[in-house]
Amino acid sequence: MIIQKFGGTSVGTPERMQSIAELISDGEKKIVVFSAVSGTTNTLVDICTALHKKDAEEALSLVGELSKLYTNFIIKLISKEETKEETLEIVDAYLNGIRSYAKKLFSPFIERSILAQGELISTNIFYQYLKSKGQKSVLLNALDFMRTDNSGEPDQQFIEENLQFELSKYPKKDLFICQGYICRNAFGELDNLKRGGSDYTASLIGAAIKADSIQIWTDIDGMHNNDPRIVEQTRPIQELSFKEAAELAYFGAKILHPASIRPAEEKNIPVWLKNTMEPSAHGTLIHSKSSAKGFKAVAAKDGITAIKIRSGRMLMAYGFLRNVFEVFERFKTPIDMITTSEVAVSVTIDDLTNLEGIVNELKDFGNVEVDENQTIVCVVGDYSAEGKGYASLIFNALDEIPIRMISYGGSNHNVSLLIQTEDKKAALTALNKGVFNL
Ligand code: ADP
Ligand code: ASP
Ligand code: MG
């Protein structure tokens, strides 16, 4: 069995849904995971923002826009009269659900419920479309098996058991459709796997059924060597190891949700990144075999804050770092990068919820400096020890860019640099030229 996940742009128009119906019709047994139609989740976020500001009128007008969009979508997509009417009613019921939330006191629960509607709508429309063409499929409800635990992490055992149970109800069926992104949390409430989470759903489902492969179908021909939204000339990468892909996803390559590689890696399931608009393009294969040595790609993660703690007491002392790290642990704030010298340690974080508390406690250990608006640039590749000259190529390329922190050697796959966010475009462009000759 394989998993095929289609992102927002891939399912974004009636024509695209029609081509997906052809793409998935190869007779292979599969689960097809759908994102919301592109733009929908952003609109749902805007609806929540309006409700948070108690602007129900604005929220309802946004629901009205969605209603127009989906009415036209369905009319174009489904020609069979009966199914068309039925689908319009189904989508209307979801949108009415959002309208009814607008009358209630806004809460995090309502927010998460509203955010879940996009994937419920897109999968229902696609299922109805297949039905109108006489193509048999089963519409699974992700809320029956996708679940997070007390710490907000996917509950893999629950997912495995309950997905297997759902599938066992249809032993003769080959085509299953299900929503990406949405799940229930440990309290059984509607929740989600964070923005871009449909990739994560695909990987978790793939791991749960030990799929033969997980295919992430998107609007570009695979992972590129640099961010195509920022740098003009980029090229697709044919092959990446799990480790390399995971670092790129974690450090900002938007094509993959940050956590989406781990479940596939744990079960050693190959992941393909493919282009829905150009299915014959090779795309990127992510698997366990270590691929070519040297540089693979650059990614950048914004919204980073650097914290430096300087103290004479650190010199020749032990236990200092443990005290510092315990502060972050107490505030449940993960650290991304670390650099140390004899008298100072710098760390970076991207979750600023507890910044004030963290800084106050760190002041007990020394002088604390905080720099916001930083970006981690991550140069990913296979830098096995026998390789030489990687660092010098990177630093030569960046000789015009002020660098705040450098981390090299933590893994064989990653050189990370901290720069000011305003220098990001210049840094990515310089690395494209100096490291990739583009
Ligand atoms: P989907 O809606 O299919 O999930 P996303 O928008 O989440 O698609 O991810 C695909 C986008 O990721 C591409 O259109 C591209 O702009 C962006 N992207 C950022 N970095 C990279 C990269 N290194 N390689 C490929 N795409 C990238
Ligand atoms: N629809 C969600 C989002 O826009 C999840 C996804 O597309 O992966 O973030
Ligand atoms: Mg995405």
Image: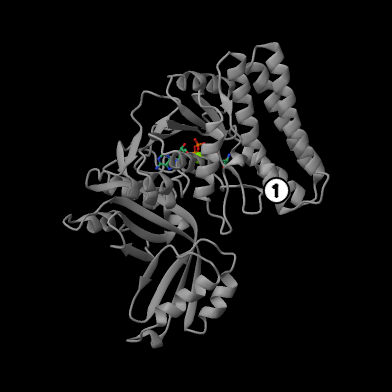
Q: Give the x, y percent position of residue 73.
A: 65, 22
Q: Give the x, y percent position of residue 306.
A: 47, 67
Q: Amino acid type of disc 1?
A: Glu
Q: Residue at x 48, y 45 (%)?
A: 257
Q: Residue at x 22, y 47 (%)?
A: 293
Residue 26 picture quarter = top left
Residue 222 picture quarter = top left
In the image, taking residue 324 as reference, residue 180 lies left or right, namely right
Asked whether residue 305 appears in the rendered view, the answer is yes
Q: Relative to 226, is 406 above or below?
A: below
Colouring rule applied to residues: one colour
Please state which of residues 282 and 229 is positioned toward the viewer in this rendering. Answer: 282
Residue furthest to the right? 103
Please state which of residues 88 and 280 is positioned toward the viewer in this rendering. Answer: 88
| Label 1 residue SS | helix
Q: Give the x, y percent position of residue 277.
A: 45, 25
Please state which of residues 20 and 350 is positioned toward the viewer in this rendering. Answer: 20
Count every numbered label the image shows and give the total: 1
Q: Give the x, y percent position of residue 57.
A: 82, 41
Please state which of residues 179 and 36 is positioned toward the viewer in this rendering. Answer: 179
On-image quarter of the C terminus: top left
Residue furthest to the top? 80
On-image quarter of the N terminus: top left
Would you say the beta carbon of the disc 1 residue lies within 8 angstroms of ligand 2? no
Asked whether residue 46 appears in the rendered view, the answer is no
Q: Residues within 10 Å of mark 1 (few under 14, many from 20)?
A: many
Q: Relative to 318, is 405 above or below?
A: above
Q: Which residue is mark 1?
A: 111
Q: Residue at x 64, y 34 (%)?
A: 120
